[in-house]
Every structure is written in C-alpha cells, then in structure tokens.
Image (cartoon, coloured by chain):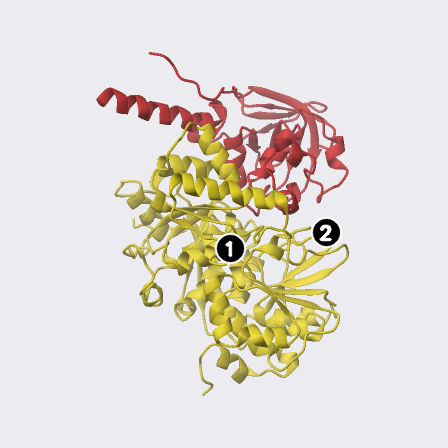
Chain colours: A red, B yellow
C-alpha cells in the first residue's frame, strides 16, 4: 500500500555541534518574543525580535546552528508557540536547560526544536562550542572535554520529534484513520 | 493506595481504572479553547495536518480577547482568520466583541466548563478553570490543533503538591494575596511539572471568584494546573450555568502527594510582587515604606477582573480621586461582569474618581494595547505577570497586587495599602458581603 506523506518529515539530528549562548534562570516567553509582535505567526518576522527584551544585542550575534544554554524553568509564562518558532527561525539549533517550563518544552518538540534537559547544568561560557549527542545522551564542552548527562525525552515526545514535529505525527494518524474507515466501509 | 483528584479525572478520561503520577495517558478532552493570538496558528497547523473537520464543534471555544477590539490591521486580520474558521466549521462558541470576555472568565460563566472536565487551551492561564474541580491546562497552538482534529491529547499525569490553607484572612487580605504569598513561598518553579491542589479550611469559605484568582496563578509557580475540589460553593455557582452535568471528584485520604505546604492565613498580609518575577513578594507595609511612585494602575485581567474584584476596588475609590500623576485603567473581564458593574454603579465610581473604563480585553496585561508602558514607567496591576517588558517597554516595571491595593495606590500615587486611606475592617467586610459583628 502507498505510504502517504502529507508533510515532509525532517529527521531528528543525532548530534548537534554549535556555539553556546548562555542565559539565566526563568527566561520567560515574554522576553523570548514580546507580545507586541504576536499579531503575526510568520517565523521570519518573529525571529527578527527574538530575545530582544532579554538582551537587545543577542539576536544580531546568533548564527544558524548556535545552541542556547539556560538555567532553571526556561520558557516559563505564556503558552505562545511563537517562542520556540522564533528561536528556531533565528537559527537556534537546540536549547539546553537545567529545567524547562512544561508548555515550552512541549511546544518546542511539537515545532521540531530539539530541547535537552541537564539537571546539573552545563557550566560553559557564551561562544564556547558544545556538542549535544542525542544517541549517547551527552553534552560535551569541546574546550575542556567535560561531559554532562542529557535526560532522555519521554517516548511519546521522542516519537513526535522523530516524526519531524506534531504536524506530521498527527497527519500520519489521521491518514491511518481514513484508511481504516475506507477499509471497513 | 488512593488517587489524587487529578489522577482520578485523568483516569476517567483515558478509560483506565487507575493512573499514577508519571504515567503517560491519552485523555479525551471536554473543552478546547484558543484566543486571537494562538488560534490563527492552530488553524494553520490543523490544515497542515490534513484535517478537514474538527472532532466536535460543541467542544471548541474561540475567543478574541488579547488584541481585541483590534488595535491595528494585523490584529484585525488574525481575528478575521478565526471568524472564517468558525463559520467554516460551524463552531457555536465564538464570542464576538461586545458579547465576549477574557476566555478564562467567560467560559466558566457560560457554563462551558464544569467540574470533572478535562480542559485544554492555547493559553497558559487555562489553569484558571481548575477552580471548578476540572483538570485544566495550557498548551501551544499545535497541541490544540491536534486535539481539535483527534478529540484527545497526550498528558503526563502530574504529581500533586498540596497547599493547605488554615485560619481566617485578615481585613484587606484577598485570595490574590494568598496566591501571591504562596508563589513567594514556593517560587516560580516551585511546582514545575506538578499540579497544585488548594485545600484546607480557609478555601472552603472562598468564593468562586476568589478560587478562579488562585487557580489562575498556578502557572506562575510552574504548575500544570491548579485545582480545588468541587464543593457546595462550586455546585451552587454552577446552578443555571452548567451545560453538562458536573462530576465531583475528591482526592482519596491515602493519595500520594509530592509534598504538602501549610499556610497559616492569619499571618498573611496583603502582598506586592516586585519586578520581574511573581515570586518577588513582600508585604504591602514593606512596599509602602519604599515610597514607590506609580504612573499607571490597572484593575482587570483573567486574574482579577471579576465582579468581586471591582466591588473591592470601587469601595476603596468611592468618594476619592485618582492621584493627578496616575492613570487608572479599569477593565471588567467579561460583558456580564461589565453589565453587573454598571447595574451596581461601580463603573460610575471609577469614572467619577477619574479612571478610564474599557470594554473587556486582555489588553494592558500583556502589553498589547489599552495602556502600554513607556520606558522608565512603573505600574501596579491586578494581573498575573510582572516579567520584563510584559506591559510595555523592557525598561518599565510592573508590581502585582490585589484590586484593593491597586485602587489605594491609584489614589495615593504610590504603592500603598487601603488602610492608609483610613479604610477599616468594616469597610472591607461591607464589600465582601459580610456584616461586621
């Protein structure tokens, strides 16, 4: 039988190597993307204002493939999915944090932005290079060689991330429902 | 071992006899909501999923509340997209400007959420509905799109942190002060991935309005939801509202809790949360001593825009004038609250005092419109978040407090308590409908 693919799925990278940008605890979604820009969902437009209320200079320094390294409760506050969308569109390849606010964590996986929790924290400075290895479950500080453990994602979230996000995941389920309905009709 | 209230609701909605904290379940949803910021993205993702029909039009509410009435063309275009989807899908619960309210005030008022429900919304303050004894939690737009298509959502059953309140509240202490105090005690990540269950003798005497205020700010402690057991107060409030039969769940005496925090309410003073986190709380007496001049005072939002909040503020403002250096903005949170406040003469008191009164909107709470702050300005607000830039410029400041403290501050031009205006216990009890003995 033909395999439907309504949305092209992008595979989860096994390993991300990038420059770190270090931010503090409780970085809220209002500073990730202020509400005054929420009259659009256009990723490019949102990326133009990413993190500007936290540090107005940061967005011009972020290069595609960079990694955000945060403290506790990253992404707290508003449920706006515009936050992970803006980070992803700005080129952030992955967010590493000691802990995540749960709505942000879920949203990030849904839009295909890799997120990694490391409870003990990753003590690197901005612009140092780190490597996140999803298969090994490690985060490595390239300069010192120090290795930190990455918490595994729950199975359901891993499935969603591997499908390329929640949209292709649900699309697949809906297609199965349709085929099932057609077969039993 | 018994189950918590949250575990019982999630077990029933996932077709299981028993679930435990940590289990991943696929739960049936009773009500799904989205607003004008989050719905357009949900609609777009819904279409990308290849979905054509929502699973049940009766289980979806769409409320234009954030950038409404539209302050600009982009915002107008977002609401237009909602209206088109609502028409296309035949959704009965769309609330137009002039008939609407802030979603978390409106849905319970309309009886669209009832005790025992699972409610998810593309808005973090969806947890407000937990006041009714429902499991209610915020999600992003794509999760909402998935639920609109499938009628279910995946959830990790949260552990529950129990907060036991005991003792009577002092005069001018409100449920807002209790929740600010609680967040100050446990921190903004104090209940991360957990549910907060509000219990104890004090909560039984708190009105539904006050319970909504407390459940609303559960997310400000990182919680997935904030929940009260439904009781006679809840069921009385549901009379004539509930569109579906309420189901009352109670935590078992031997349920497992992640922890218990006890709060002696008699020791709690009115609270003020300082910038830029809701956990930065101090008693109002301490804040007042700092002579913090304000530029704006805001009374409204899904936290404190209900009728009891407006009564309290009006009692403080009655016969007084807003300080010449202050803008007071009062926004009833729903059309029903607006009309009630009109009928009780409260809006007249606000206008007479020199305040501005607006049609329902989230507006200033998120710095969207209707009172955005300039650089260096300071506001005191009854809303729920004081993050950097939340109400406007990144170099503005937001202090969170109860409607009584905000009203008193508006009069004095600085952060102050109602007692500084000579308002005594009797004046307070008058507004909460209790005669002083």
- Residue B319 location, x and y as percent? 62, 82
Is residue B91 visible in the rendered image? The answer is yes
Q: Chain of mark 1?
A: B
Classify mark 1: helix, strand or loop: loop
Where residue A70 sits, quadrant-wise, is top right
* Picture residue at 53% right of the left edge, 77% below the top: B171
Q: Which mark is residue B97?
A: 1
- Residue A180 location, x and y as percent? 28, 23
Horizontally, residue A173 falls left or right of residue A70, namely left
Classify mark 2: helix, strand or loop: loop
* Picture residue at 41% right of the left edge, 26% below the top: A171
Query: For the residues marked 2 and 1, what is the alpha-carbon distance in whole angstroms?
Result: 27 Å
Is residue A102 visible in the rendered image? The answer is no
Q: Which mark is residue B393?
A: 2
Horizontally, residue A174 falls left or right of residue A17, namely left
Q: Which is in the foreground here, disc 2 or disc 1? A: 1
Q: Nearer the viewer, residue A136 or B344?
A: B344
Q: Chain of mark 2?
A: B
Residue A82 vs A88, above or below: the answer is below
Where residue B55 sits, quadrant-wise, is top left
Quadrant housing the N terminus of chain A: top left
- Residue B350 location, x and y as percent? 60, 73
Dot 2 alpha-carbon crowd within 10 angstroms: few under 14, some 14 to 19, many 20 or more:
some
Residue B287 vs B134, above or below: the answer is below
């Amino acid at each position: 039988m033909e395999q439907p693919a309504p949305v092209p799925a992008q595979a989860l990278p096994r390993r991300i190597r990038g420059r770190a940008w270090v931010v503090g605890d409780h970085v809220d979604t209002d500073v990730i993307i202020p509400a005054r820009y929420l009259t659009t969902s256009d990723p490019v437009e949102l990326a133009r204002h990413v993190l500007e209320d936290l540090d107005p200079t940061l967005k011009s320094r972020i290069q595609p493939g960079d990694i955000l390294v945060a403290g506790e409760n990253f992404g707290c506050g508003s449920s706006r999915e515009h936050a992970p969308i803006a980070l992803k569109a700005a080129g952030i390849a992955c967010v590493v944090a000691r802990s995540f606010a749960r709505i942000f964590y879920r949203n990030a996986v849904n839009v295909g932005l890799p997120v990694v929790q490391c409870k003990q924290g990753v003590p690197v400075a901005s612009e140092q290079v780190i490597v996140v290895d999803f298969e090994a479950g490690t985060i490595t500080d390239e300069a010192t060689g120090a290795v930190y453990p990455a918490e595994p994602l729950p199975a359901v979230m891993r499935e969603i991330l591997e499908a390329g996000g929640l949209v292709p995941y649900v699309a697949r389920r809906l297609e199965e429902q349709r085929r099932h309905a057609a077969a039993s009709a | 071992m018994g189950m918590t209230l949250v575990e019982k609701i999630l077990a029933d909605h996932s077709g299981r006899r028993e679930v435990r904290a940590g289990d991943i379940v696929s739960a049936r949803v009773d009500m799904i909501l989205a607003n004008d910021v989050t719905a357009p993205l949900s609609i777009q993702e819904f279409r990308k999923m290849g979905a054509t029909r929502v699973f049940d039009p009766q289980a979806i509410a769409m409320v234009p509340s954030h950038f409404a009435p539209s302050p600009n063309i982009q915002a107008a275009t977002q609401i237009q997209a909602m209206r088109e989807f609502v028409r296309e899908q035949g959704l009965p619960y769309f609330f137009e400007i002039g008939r609407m309210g802030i979603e978390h005030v409106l849905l319970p008022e309309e009886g669209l959420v009832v005790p025992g429900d699972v409610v998810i919304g593309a808005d973090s303050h969806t947890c407000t509905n937990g006041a009714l004894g429902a499991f209610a939690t915020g999600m992003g737009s794509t999760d909402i799109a998935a639920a609109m298509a499938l009628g279910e959502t995946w959830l990790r059953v949260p552990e529950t942190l129990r907060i036991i309140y005991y003792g009577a509240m002092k005069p001018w202490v409100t449920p807002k002060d209790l929740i600010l105090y609680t967040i100050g005690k446990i921190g903004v990540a104090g209940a991360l991935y957990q549910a907060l269950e509000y219990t104890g003798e004090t909560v039984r005497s708190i009105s539904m309005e006050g319970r909504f205020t407390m459940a609303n700010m559960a997310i400000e402690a990182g919680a997935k939801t904030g929940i009260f057991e439904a009781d006679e107060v809840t069921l009385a409030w549901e009379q004539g509202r509930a569109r579906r039969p309420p189901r009352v769940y109670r935590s078992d005496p031997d349920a497992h809790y992640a922890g218990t925090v006890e709060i002696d309410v008699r020791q709690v003073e009115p609270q003020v949360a300082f910038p830029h986190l809701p956990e930065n709380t101090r008693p109002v007496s301490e804040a007042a001593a700092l002579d913090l001049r304000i530029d704006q005072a805001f009374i409204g939002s899904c936290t404190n825009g209900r009728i009891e909040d407006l009564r309290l503020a009006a009692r403080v403002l009655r016969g007084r004038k807003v300080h010449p250096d202050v803008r007071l903005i009062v926004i009833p949170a729903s059309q029903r609250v607006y009309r009630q406040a009109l009928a009780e003469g409260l809006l007249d008191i606000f206008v007479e005092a020199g305040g501005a009164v607006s049609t329902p909107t989230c507006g200033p709470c998120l710095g969207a419109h209707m009172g955005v702050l300039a650089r260096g300005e300071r506001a005191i607000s009854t809303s729920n978040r004081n993050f950097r830039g939340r109400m406007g410029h990144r170099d503005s400041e937001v202090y969170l407090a109860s409607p009584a403290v905000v009203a008193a501050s508006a009069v004095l031009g600085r952060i102050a308590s109602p007692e500084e205006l000579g308002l005594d216990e009797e004046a307070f009890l008058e507004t909460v409908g209790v005669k002083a003995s």
